[in-house]
Amino acid sequence: MKKYIIIFILVSTIAVGFTQKDKKATEILDRVIAKTGSYKSMEVEFIYAMDNLEADIHDEKAGILLVMGDKYKLTFVEQIMISDGTTIWTLLPDDEEVMINDAEESDEAITPTNLLNSYSDNYKSKFLKADRIDGKTVDLIELTPLKGKTYSKIELAIEHGLDQIYSFSIFDKNGSMYSYTIKKFTANVEISESEFIFYEADYPNFEIVDMR
């Protein structure tokens, strides 16, 4: 699930690169990018779900994402990911383990700011339709990767008139769908820099696995 958590961090900050542009999709995405790019920080409360109909699997859990520039902190019950823009700490509380990676050297751990450079020209965008989801009017946009990925497409639901992502789904080639629904979004929230730093002294019994 880790790689799709990273994709969530990237997509929820709206720094997606796309080519072969559908005019309407591009207009909507440009507005979302401009609006989100004006925020100094964000706090996102969301519901993550994984479904595989063939295997009869449904898994659902809540999460919280804090973002400030290249820095982020993603919190689930069983996993916490912290990045100061240079280093990523992945905490597994149940295993009492912390894995450390360089942000720029990890293929999956692309920061919000450098995503345009890393993912530019990798997606075909397409406006699908206007729809209603949970009582909200949304514009559905499909992003299809032009290069080989383990997922076949990402489908975004943009709240009409708000220029804000309400939900998105990642369609894995193995038949699974990973979806994220934003339940609460707060822009320009006050966030302490300490949220984006791992303090080893706070986890005295954790094994440190430095993968840099």
Image: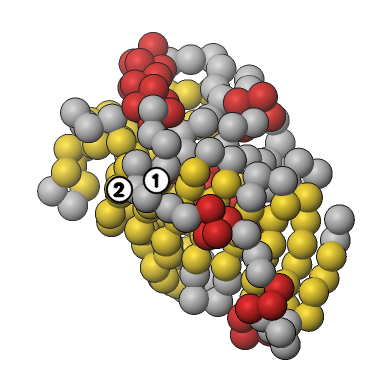
Mark 1 vs 2, N-terminal side:
1
Mark 1–mark 2 CB contact (< 8 Å): yes
State whether residue 126 is above or below residue 55.
above
Residue, disc 2: 186
Judged left or right of residue 136, residue 6 is right
x and y, in percent, of residue 64 in the image:
42, 61
Q: Quadrant of the C terminus?
A: bottom right
Seen at 69% across and 55% down, the residue is 88
Indicate the secondary structure of the residue bearing disc 1: strand
Give the Cα distance between marks 1 and 2. 6 Å
Total number of numbered labels?
2
Residue 155 is situated, as x and y percent measured from the top left of the image, at 42, 39
Horizontal placement of 87 versus 12: left or right? right
Q: Element under label 2?
A: strand
User: What amino acid type should be assigned to the residue bearing mark 2?
Assistant: Thr
Left-right relation of 197 to 86: left
155 and 54: which is toward the camera:
155
The residue at which mark 1 appears reads as 42
Compared to residue 108, the image places residue 15 above or below, namely above
Position of 177 relative to 21 (above/below): below
Give the vertical position of 161 relative to 47 (above or below).
above
Mark 1 closeness class: few <14, some 14–19, many ≥20 residues within 10 Å? many
Residue 165 occupies quadrant: top left
Q: Residue at x 58, y 71 (%)?
A: 79
